[in-house]
């Protein structure tokens, strides 16, 4: 499979008044064409930071210290504004976690959707007529199964429910993207009953359009159900990646194991004891492998050096000294 | 009553709480301008309190005339020069601070408490006749710009510093009523208020023990900012001649009398004018700093 | 709720408030001064003259009767007899109000244009040098009282660098156009006297600026901080992530939510413009309603004072209603959300 997106050794920090918090610690992962990758991680593990770095929409106090994000042969971190804008309009798109915050409250949904369509280039030509924009908007809204799309177009975000708003965001993204969709916890803020619907919708549209996907979630069930490959993130590092089925049936990294064991099982057996300790403070992160303070198998080398990926089988990689015989 | 005293005691205890004080100080000092404001206000207070002791010619605040020395430009003997009857402008300006701050203290002291009490009560009983009555009356006072109403009231009574203060008091309370009304009426539906009601607390208790503490931050911010505005209003009134009467060394009056001598004889107007600007600027910056402190506590 | 309902409710409420204001003003005029008849007669008039005046003014009747007859006269355009100008106050109002309205109008335009320009510049270059300069200017500028600013402007721009006239509404050598509406601006357009219009504008610049400067800087600060705050919001990040052009984001998607708090404040700013005019018109000797107001106040002409407070109150109320309508237009949440009232 051809590589679509290659993140290499990404280091990103934030400048805050107490100093600088080093969130991403040399993050690396790859997305292939047509692949659906899931990223699992706790809140605060740096997932959103990584995704925002890809589109270069980080907060103003963010510092990209080093690294490379390679997309279709170009390094996104180094291209100029014009090329970046092209990529944002046509190739990569992102769905945000909170649909209420993602939509401008003083403009109608139709206005925002039309502008996205207008600049995405899916309608050919220089001067696009308003009727065409409207027609395309309605078409996209029907694709996301929104009832009464006319009314939705003329509505303001506060008049719509959470599920409807997220569908509009999905329409904005899936209607215009051609290569990669990044979905940052798209259903976390929705009612449980809606979550399932929205995920199925996304799944369907993604396979129809043959898009690659990065799906971020802290819900293991979601990842298991939809993705081809799963990556596990901890404190700004990618620590394990494997085909989804393999990842769930044969977790290698102690953190992944702890995570999977923490899920209560329907087959009984009670609750696990969880993972001791807590997520590190990014202002003063642990040296070497950032998980070592919480790891039962930690040894000296874990405190000194950060482990690189090693392959167990063909596509199952893990960054842990337990598997890295040196 | 006992509970109210207990409430105040708790607030004082909060202030002496080192940790909270330290955090608040940290938030305050994040913006250097707030410190500038604090310094300016400190200087103004110092000048106001020590005026009789640090000025070279304290007798010049009265009818003292010395025509030989009239209209002298600034010199070593008279730092800010002398006015049209020979009085030292520096002395009078420093005493001007005293009058201005005194006026602000009295006006705010008298008008804030009733305004706050009315607003809290009206907000708690939102939708009832208490609400309608209080807020409609407040709206009437707000319907006319403060300066205009103050001018009218002072004109109708006889112009004097006292009447000017009275007029401003009359005009100022509605703003505090409005402020506390909006907080009170929005908090009224919060769970902690309802919980207090269910456990049998009286409305008095709820208003002053549960709701009122949440308004302290905005009230304190507004009071600080208002010192500047009250002084502005007061000096506008005396500029027109409806406030403090000569020979009182009021900053507004001084700007007005000095205006006749412009542009050659500039020191009569410029120094009092700068004094007014400094006071307002100082309290504005300080008020912004206080707002910063309480902004994050409300969230 | 529909816009028309919104406007109607707002207006009805305003009228109610104005009635309340009329009662307040009446109290100020009749109750506070102690003895209006004595005030009218003067301190040296003999007792019987005072009594006669008391009869004339109807001050012997009960208070509510006085109020209603006063109100009745009001609705017939009779604002009472002015002891200062020796004629009906309504005539005074009609003569002087247009001049002030022209001043207020120009000042309002200055304020809106200035606030938007400065606010957008500050917001777009936040924390860089244009923004820092603007913030310093606004901190100091807001602290300068309008009468001080007026004096300074007069000093600098009519004396040291004489580019504007010192006093008045029209230069003494410019004939005012035929009086049709009393508004020199309108009258000069009607009669084709563009030179008068220009001369009026030239006279208005300094007073208008003095009157609105404080409000302008305050509004600019609000717009600027609104833009800075909204810049980091998700909906802006999303617009950027979709590749929207910078100008579209800045002047549309970022600007609109940021100006909403400013518009509300601008309605209140009309109050400060009206109030400042009372001081500034006097300094520039501009023959407007506010200068007339100060004069009657100093002369203790009760009918005049009453009329002035009422007129100012009405203008301010209208301005607030307009501001509310505009806010309702710009912010759909205010217009369309169910009022929890």
Image (cartoon, coloured by chain):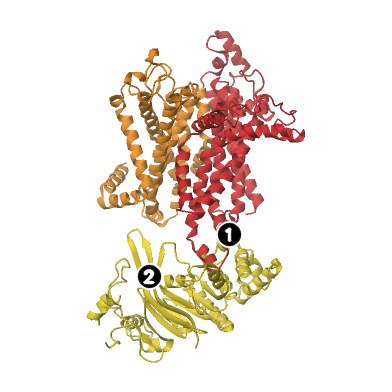
- Would residue C13 be visible to someone looking at this image? no
CB under 8 Å between discs 1 and 2 = no
The numbered mark at residue C247 is 1
The quarter of the picture where residue C188 lies is top right
Of all residues shown, which one is farthest toward the front? C161
Mark 1 residue element: helix
Of residue B2 and residue B80, the one placed in the foreground of this image is: B80
Colour displayed for chain C in the image of the structure: red
Residue under disc 1 on the same chain as residue under disc 2: no
Image quarter (top left, top right, bottom left or bottom right) of the N terminus of chain B: top left
In the rendered view, tell whether residue C187 sits above or below residue B55: below
In the rendered view, tell whether residue A162 sits above or below residue C331: below
Mark 2 residue element: loop
For marks 1 and 2, give the CA distance. 33 Å
- The answer to whether residue A306 is left or right of residue B121 is left
Closer to the observer: label 1 or label 2? 1
Q: Which residue is at a point 63% across and 68% down the rendered structure image?
A: A118
In the rendered structure, the residue with mark 1 lies on which chain? C
Of residue B17 and residue A93, the one placed in the foreground of this image is: A93
- Would residue A312 be visible to someone looking at this image? yes
- The answer to whether residue C47 is left or right of residue B209 is right
Of residue C165 and residue C123, the one placed in the foreground of this image is: C165
Question: How crowded is the residue under tag 1: few (<14 C-alpha within 10 Å), some, or many (20+)?
Answer: few
Colour displayed for chain B in the image of the structure: orange
x and y, in percent, of residue C186 in the image: 72, 35
Colour displayed for chain A in the image of the structure: yellow
In the rendered view, tell whether residue B215 sits above or below residue B234: below
Question: How crowded is the residue under tag 2: few (<14 C-alpha within 10 Å), some, or many (20+)?
Answer: some
The numbered mark at residue C73 is none
Q: Which residue is mark 2?
A: A44
x and y, in percent, of residue A72 in the image: 51, 80
């Amino acid at each position: 499979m051809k590589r679509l997106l290659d993140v290499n050794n990404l280091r990103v920090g934030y400048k805050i008044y107490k100093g600088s918090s080093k969130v991403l610690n040399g993050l690396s992962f790859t997305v292939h064409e047509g692949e659906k990758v899931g990223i699992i991680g706790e809140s605060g593990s740096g997932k959103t930071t990584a995704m925002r770095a890809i589109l270069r929409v980080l907060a103003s106090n963010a510092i990209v210290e080093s690294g490379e994000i390679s997309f279709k042969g170009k390094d996104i971190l180094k291209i100029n504004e014009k090329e970046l804008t092209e990529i944002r309009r046509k190739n990569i798109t992102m769905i945000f976690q909170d649909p209420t915050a993602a939509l401008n409250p003083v403009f109608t949904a139709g206005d925002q959707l039309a502008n996205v369509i207008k600049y995405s280039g899916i309608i050919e030509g220089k001067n696009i007529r308003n009727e065409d924009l409207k027609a395309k908007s309605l078409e996209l809204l029907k694709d996301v199964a929104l009832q009464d799309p006319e009314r939705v177009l003329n509505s303001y975000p506060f008049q719509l429910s959470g599920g409807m708003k997220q569908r509009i965001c999905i329409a904005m993204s899936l209607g215009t993207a051609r290569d990669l969709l990044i979905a940052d916890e798209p259903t976390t803020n929705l009612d449980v009953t809606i979550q399932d619907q929205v995920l199925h919708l996304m799944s369907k549209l993604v396979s129809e359009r043959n898009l690659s996907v990065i799906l971020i979630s802290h819900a293991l069930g979601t990842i298991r159900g939809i993705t081809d490959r799963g990556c596990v993130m901890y404190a700004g590092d990618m620590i394990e990646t494997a085909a989804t089925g393999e990842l769930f049936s044969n977790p290698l990294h102690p953190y992944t194991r702890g995570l999977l064991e923490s899920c209560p099982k329907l087959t009984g057996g009670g609750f696990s004891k969880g993972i001791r300790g807590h997520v590190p403070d990014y202002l003063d992160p642990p040296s070497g492998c950032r998980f070592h303070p919480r790891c039962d198998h930690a040894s000296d080398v874990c405190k000194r050096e950060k482990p690189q990926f090693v392959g167990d089988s063909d596509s199952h990689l893990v960054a842990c000294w337990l598997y890295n015989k040196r | 009553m006992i509970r109210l005293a207990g409430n105040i005691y708790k607030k004082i205890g909060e202030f002496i709480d080192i940790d909270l004080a330290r955090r608040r100080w940290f938030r305050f000092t994040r913006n250097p301008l707030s410190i500038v404001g604090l310094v300016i206000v400190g200087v103004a207070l110092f000048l106001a309190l020590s005026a009789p002791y640090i000025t070279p010619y304290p007798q010049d605040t009265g009818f003292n005339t010395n025509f030989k020395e009239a209209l002298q430009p600034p010199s070593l003997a008279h730092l800010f020069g002398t006015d049209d009857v020979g009085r030292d402008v520096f002395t009078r300006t420093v005493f001007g601070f005293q009058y201005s701050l005194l006026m602000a203290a009295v006006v705010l002291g008298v008008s804030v408490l009733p305004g706050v009490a009315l607003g809290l009560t009206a907000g708690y009983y939102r939708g009832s006749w208490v609400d309608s009555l209080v807020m409609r009356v407040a709206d009437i006072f707000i319907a006319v710009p403060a300066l205009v109403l103050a001018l009218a009231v002072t004109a109708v009574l006889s112009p004097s510093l006292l009447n000017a203060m009275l007029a401003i008091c009359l005009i100022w309370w509605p703003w505090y009523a409005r402020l506390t009304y909006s907080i009170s009426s929005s908090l009224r539906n919060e769970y902690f208020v309802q919980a207090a009601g269910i456990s049998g607390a009286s409305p008095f208790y709820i208003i002053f023990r549960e709701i009122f503490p949440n308004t302290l931050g905005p009230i304190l911010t507004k009071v600080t900012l208002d010192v500047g505005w009250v002084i502005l209003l007061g000096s506008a009134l005396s500029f027109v001649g409806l406030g403090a009467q000569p020979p009182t060394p009021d900053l507004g009056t001084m700007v007005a009398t000095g205006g006749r001598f412009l542009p050659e004889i500039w020191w009569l107007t410029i120094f009092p004018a700068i004094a007014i600007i400094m006071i307002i600027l100082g309290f504005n910056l300080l008020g912004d700093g206080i707002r910063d402190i309480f902004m994050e506590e409300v969230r | 709720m529909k816009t028309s309902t919104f406007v109607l409710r707002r207006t009805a409420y305003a009228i109610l408030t104005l009635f309340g204001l009329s009662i307040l003003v009446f109290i100020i005029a009749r109750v506070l001064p102690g003895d209006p008849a004595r005030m009218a007669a003067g301190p040296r008039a003999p007792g019987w003259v005072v009594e006669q005046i008391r009869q004339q003014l109807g001050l012997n009747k009960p208070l509510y009767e006085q109020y209603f007859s006063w109100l009745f006269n009001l609705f017939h355009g009779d604002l009472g007899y002015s002891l200062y100008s020796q004629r009906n106050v309504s005539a005074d109002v009609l003569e002087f109000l247009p001049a002030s309205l022209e001043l207020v109008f120009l000042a309002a335009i200055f304020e809106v244009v200035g606030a938007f320009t400065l606010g957008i510049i500050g917001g777009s270059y936040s924390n860089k040098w244009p923004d820092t300069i603007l913030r310093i200017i606004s901190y100091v500028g807001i602290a300068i009282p309008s009468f001080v600013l007026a004096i300074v402007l007069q000093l600098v721009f009519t004396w040291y660098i004489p580019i504007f006239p010192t006093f008045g509404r029209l230069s003494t050598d410019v004939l005012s156009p035929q009086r049709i509406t009393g508004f020199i601006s309108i009258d000069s357009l009607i009669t084709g006297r563009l030179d008068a219009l220009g001369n009026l504008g030239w006279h208005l610049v300094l007073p208008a600026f003095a009157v609105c400067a404080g409000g302008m800087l305050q509004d600019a600060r609000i717009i600027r901080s609104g833009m800075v705050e909204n810049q980091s919001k998700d909906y802006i990040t999303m617009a950027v992530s979709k590749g929207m052009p910078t100008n579209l984001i800045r002047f549309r998607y970022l600007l609109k939510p940021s100006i909403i708090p400013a518009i509300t404040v601008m309605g209140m700013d009309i109050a400060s413009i009206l109030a400042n005019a009372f001081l500034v018109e006097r300094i520039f000797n501009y023959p407007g309603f506010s200068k007339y107001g100060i004069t009657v106040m100093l002369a203790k002409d009760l009918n005049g004072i009453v009329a002035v407070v009422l007129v100012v109150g009405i203008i301010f109320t209208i301005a607030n209603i307009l501001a509310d309508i505009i806010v309702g237009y710009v912010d759909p949440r205010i217009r369309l959300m169910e009022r929890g009232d």
